[in-house]
Amino acid sequence: MNQQQQAASSTNTRGKHRILAELKRLEQETRFLEEELEKLEKMEKVSAACKELQSIVEVRPDPLLPETNGPVNPSWDRWFEGPQDSKGCRCWIL
């Protein structure tokens, strides 16, 4: 066997290995997607699950938000309101 035939043979081997590796990767991906489809087929419809979750969330108040009918401390309101008299306001921001 001469040098050209040896080089061609090694190139063919590497090419076959790449093709087999790609084929194996595609087979793994196919298996993964088939498993995902099986899981999705077994799952309950999303709309039903969302409706159930919405009914639970609507009934319970948010524990992080306090329930108040008015300001807890009325003196804090003055900080969030604009100036009552624009002539009396000498601040540069407003």
Image (tube, rainbow, N blue to C red):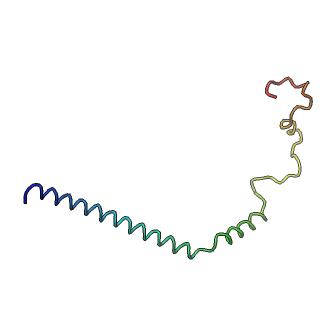
Quick check: 90 left or right of 46? right
| Residue drawn at x 78%, y 60% as measured from the top left | 61
State whether residue 66 is above or below residue 77.
Answer: below
Viewer-proximal residue among 1 and 44 = 1
Q: Quadrant of residue 25?
A: bottom left
The answer to whether 72 is drawn above or below residue 25 in the figure is above
| Left or right, residue 74 beside residue 58 | right
Residue 21 % position (x, y): 31, 63
Q: Position of residue 32 (x, y in %)?
A: 45, 68
- Location of the N terminus by quadrant is bottom left
Residue 64 point in image, percent of width and height: 74, 53
Q: How many marks?
A: 0
Question: Would you say 8 lies left or right of 17 here?
Answer: left
User: Residue at position x 56%, y 75% from top?
Assistant: 41
User: Residue farthest to the bottom?
Assistant: 42
Vertical comparison of 90 with 39: above or below: above
* Front residue of 64 and 39: 39
Q: Who's the residue at 82% across and 28% down the image? A: 94
Q: Tell me where residue 80 appears, x and y as whole percent.
A: 83, 38
